[in-house]
Amino acid sequence: MIDIDSTENIRTVIVNMDSDKNTFDRYQINIDWTLQELTDYILKEKQLEPPYKLRNLTTQRLFVKEELDTKMRSYQDF
């Protein structure tokens, strides 16, 4: 467990799969990761095989391929 008060780079993300809309998992991640790194991390943690797409649960917007190299810090939600 990471003490999120001790670092400004750590955030908690909520992951919900389209296949199971009633289950939400929480992961502590580093906002200096790219969206691709986040995707890879979630797939590893959930033991899934690519390809998968990320959706912002707040806005319901899918992240597009061109954004995969963007650091999560660039997004207001983080």
Image (tube, helix red, strand yellow):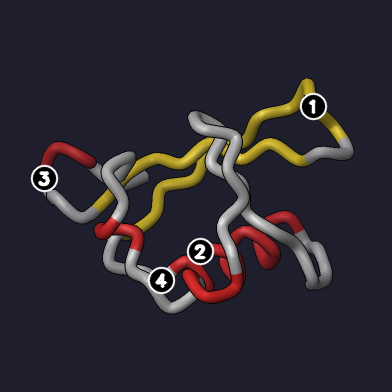
Q: Are marks 1 and 4 in contact (CB under 8 Å)?
A: no
Could you tell me how far apart the alpha carbons at marks 2 and 1 are, in whole angstroms? 20 Å
Q: Does 5 sit left or right of 42 as displayed?
A: left
- Identify the mark nearer the N-term, 2 or 1: 1
Are the two marked residues, 2 and 1, in contact with CB atoms closer than 8 angstroms?
no
Q: How far is mark 1 from mark 4, CA to CA?
A: 25 Å
Q: Residues within 10 Å of mark 3 (few under 14, many from 20)?
A: few
Dot 2, how many residues are within 10 Å of its Cα: few (below 14), some (14-19), or many (20+)? many
Residue identified by numbered label 4: 34
Q: Is residue 64 above or below residue 46?
A: below
Name the residue tied to disc 1: 21
Judging by the rendered image, the residue that carries numbered circle 2 is 38
**Dot 3 corresponds to which residue?**
6
Amino acid type, label 3: Ser
Quadrant containing the N terminus is: top left
Quarter of the figure with the C terminus = top left
Q: CA distance from mark 1 to mark 3?
A: 32 Å
Label 2 to label 4, Cα distance in Å? 6 Å
- Determine whether the residue tagged by mark 1 lies in a helix, strand or loop: strand
Q: Amino acid at mark 4?
A: Thr
Of labels 3 and 2, earlier in sequence is 3
Vertically, is 70 above or below 42? below
Q: Do labels 1 and 3 touch, CB within 8 Å?
A: no
Query: What's the residue type where badge 2 is placed?
Result: Leu
Which tag, 4 or 3, sits closer to the chain's start? 3
